[in-house]
Image (cartoon, helix red, strand yellow):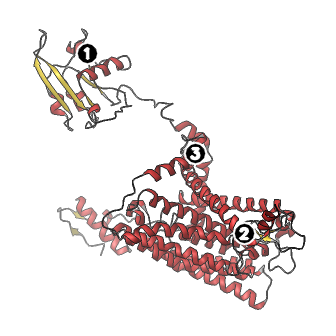
């Protein structure tokens, strides 16, 4: 009995147990994400969605899994075999290992531990470079897509892979900038410290809590613009609509996974949904207060096991909200054209992101109070709008395809043809 | 350059008044910023997402609920009509086979044992998988012997099973004659 207690009280063994638990939890969550996606798309289109397998269709993921397992696994003859088989595993594994540094429940102590013992962290790895680790791992995810597209030896798959590579490179930059803003605001690279910085009641904390509520000093309130840009880039990084140019069924059949079938295809999809969960988890940790519930001091700071479990629940609930947002966005917006995608990244997100980073650096350098960043954000938004008025060109969206002269000539030709 | 009058290829002169200037509407501020429009779109989709009423009214839960069909004009499985003596009404004139654009009707006609017609079909096969349900056979038939019925749940486990022969087509008639009575049989008399 003592052995079990000691093992559980040791961070190393606790991390191993936790990682197994998280792996199981995430796999289930990913399977149900796919059901949720189908349900949400159905609701938005005034349908019911899958409702035949089990009560209200809740066993649908099981049926899907069984179907995919027993499907014929086609390996075409014209492919690079090693890379073809490796690619789905890369995209899946890379999406999963990002969970290692997500702070699910913060610090806690078992009831049998001494009051002054070092607390355990409900987190697989508490490392100094938590955020850099997530960034690095998230960028590796594109290898699966690119290799899959390359190894398929098929022009549609190849286009998909190339597009994914270009898109990832472009969107990594504003993503990194926004993460940098988060780092500079919370003044830490450790995800668990970034979350505790957002409690905001401590006088030493960089950010003051709104209305004096414990756990309401979310980075979101100090950098709303940065949070929006982070969400956009996270969509692009996860290859989700409206940034799903790498798969885009209408133009490229299936893009990088055109040649895949059966379980390999399923791994790509599990990877995509796992990536969605990771990216929303780390957005929540940096910008949306992690597991903090505004005004509930006991939950936010207590080191009891119950509080830890509740914090994990709060974190998961926030992730669920983000996933829903991802899905509603997917079924609302049409896909970008490729040039619009690039314009959005390079002509608007990167400059705005640079301005935000400079703003936060300036605040730190001059040792100004953090609320200055709210003013700065509003100013940057106003400047962007003003530039839009002066330039008279959309940041993205519709474009003039023809200049006026050309239009008239076209009209003439049309009239001539009509006679 | 717009003022000059030019002779078009079709020989018709056109003037400036013929030209219609179509400009794309100017983008408003919110359209240029893009994000407000995104939220506008999400408002619409979320409204549909939480509106149960439309879903309940419109969705047909198929095996339990059936669609309401307009039975007189719906084009489903074929049938071969019987005349008032219970004989097959077809006179094996091959009009439907000729009219069929999918070539899915195959008829073999022989000398009729009855005095009121010259021929009748001993074989009448329709490949329901080839059929495109255009209804041209029905239009071509001079005696209104072949008709399309409102039956649409057509299933089979093999291709052979989906080739309907004369007996099967007559069975379809027996099954559907109450639902959709035979079209003006009095005119032809068959």
Residue A30 seen anywhere in this rendered image of the structure: yes
Badge 1 marks a residue whose secondary structure is loop
Q: Are marks 1 and 3 in contact (CB under 8 Å)?
A: no
Same-chain check, marks 2 and 1: no
**Marks 1/3: CA distance?**
50 Å
- Spot the residue most to the bottom: A365
Please name the residue that numbered disc 3 is placed on. Answer: A59
Badge 3 marks a residue whose secondary structure is loop
State which quarter of the image contains the C terminus of chain B: top left
- Is B154 above or below relative to A236? above
Q: Is residue A281 found left or right of A140 in the rendered image? A: right
Residue A379 seen anywhere in this rendered image of the structure: no
Please name the residue that numbered disc 1 is placed on. Answer: B82
**Marks 3/2: CA distance?**
33 Å
The residue at 21%/38% (across/down) is: B102
State which quarter of the image contains the N terminus of chain B: bottom left
Task: Report the chain holding disc 1.
Answer: B
Of marks 1 and 3, the one in the foreground: 3
Between A215 and A118, the one nearer to me in the picture? A118
Please name the residue that numbered disc 2 is placed on. Answer: A13
């Amino acid at each position: 009995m003592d052995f079990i207690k000691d093992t559980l009280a040791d961070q190393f063994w606790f991390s191993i147990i936790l990682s197994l638990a998280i792996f199981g939890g995430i796999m289930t969550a990913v399977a149900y994400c796919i059901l949720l996606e189908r349900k949400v798309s159905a609701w938005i289109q005034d349908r019911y969605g899958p409702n035949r397998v089990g009560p209200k269709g809740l066993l649908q993921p099981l049926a899907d899994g069984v179907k995919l397992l027993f499907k014929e696994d086609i390996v075409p003859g014209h492919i690079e075999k090693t890379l073809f088989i490796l690619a789905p595993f890369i995209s899946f594994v890379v999406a999963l290992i990002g969970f290692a540094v997500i702070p699910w429940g913060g610090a806690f102590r078992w009831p049998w531990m001494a009051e002054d013992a070092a607390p355990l962290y409900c987190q697989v790895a508490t490392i100094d470079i938590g955020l850099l680790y997530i960034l690095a791992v998230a960028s590796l995810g594109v290898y699966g897509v690119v290799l899959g597209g390359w190894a398929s030896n098929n022009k549609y798959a190849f286009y998909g892979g190339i597009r994914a590579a270009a898109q990832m490179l472009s969107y990594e930059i504003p993503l990194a900038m926004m993460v940098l803003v988060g780092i500079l605001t919370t003044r830490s690279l450790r995800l668990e410290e970034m979350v505790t910085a957002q409690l905001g009641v401590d006088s030493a904390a960089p950010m003051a809590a709104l209305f004096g509520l414990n756990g309401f000093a979310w980075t979101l309130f100090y950098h709303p613009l940065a949070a929006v840009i982070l969400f956009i880039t996270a969509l692009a990084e996860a290859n989700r609509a409206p940034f799903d140019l790498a798969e885009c069924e209408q133009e490229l059949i299936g893009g990088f996974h055109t040649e895949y079938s059966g379980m390999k295809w399923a791994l790509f999809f599990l990877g995509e949904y796992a990536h969605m969960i990771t990216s929303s988890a780390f957005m929540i940790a940096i910008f949306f207060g992690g597991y903090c519930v505004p005004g509930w001091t006991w939950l936010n700071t207590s080191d009891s096991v119950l509080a830890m479990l509740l914090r994990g629940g709060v974190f998961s609930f926030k992730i669920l909200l983000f996933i829903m947002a991802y899905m509603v966005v997917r079924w609302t917006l049409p896909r970008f054209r490729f040039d619009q995608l690039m314009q959005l990244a390079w002509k608007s997100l990167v400059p705005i992101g640079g301005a935000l980073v400079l703003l936060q650096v300036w605040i730190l350098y001059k040792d100004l109070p953090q609320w200055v960043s709210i003013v700065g954000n509003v100013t940057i938004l106003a400047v962007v709008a003003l530039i839009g008025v002066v330039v008279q060109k959309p940041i993205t969206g519709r474009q003039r395809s023809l200049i006026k002269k050309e239009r008239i000539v076209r009209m003439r030709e049309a009239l001539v043809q009509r006679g | 350059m717009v003022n000059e009058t030019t002779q078009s290829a079709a020989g018709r002169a056109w003037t400036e008044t013929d030209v219609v200037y179509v400009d794309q509407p100017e983008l408003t501020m919110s359209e240029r910023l893009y994000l407000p429009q995104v939220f506008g779109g999400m408002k619409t989709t979320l409204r549909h997402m939480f509106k149960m009423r439309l879903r309940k009214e419109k969705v047909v839960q198929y095996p339990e609920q059936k669609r309401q069909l307009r039975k007189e004009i719906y084009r489903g499985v074929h049938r071969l009509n019987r005349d008032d003596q219970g004989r097959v009404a077809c006179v094996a004139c091959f009009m439907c086979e000729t009219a069929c654009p999918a070539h899915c009707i195959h008829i073999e006609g022989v000398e009729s044992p009855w005095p009121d017609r010259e021929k009748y079909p001993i074989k009448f096969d329709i490949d329901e998988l080839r059929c495109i349900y255009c209804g041209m056979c029905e239009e071509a038939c001079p005696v209104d012997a072949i008709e399309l019925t409102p039956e649409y749940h057509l299933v089979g486990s093999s291709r052979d099973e989906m080739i309907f022969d004369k007996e099967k087509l007559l069975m379809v008639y027996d099954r559907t004659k109450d639902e959709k009575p035979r079209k003006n049989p009095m005119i032809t008399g068959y």
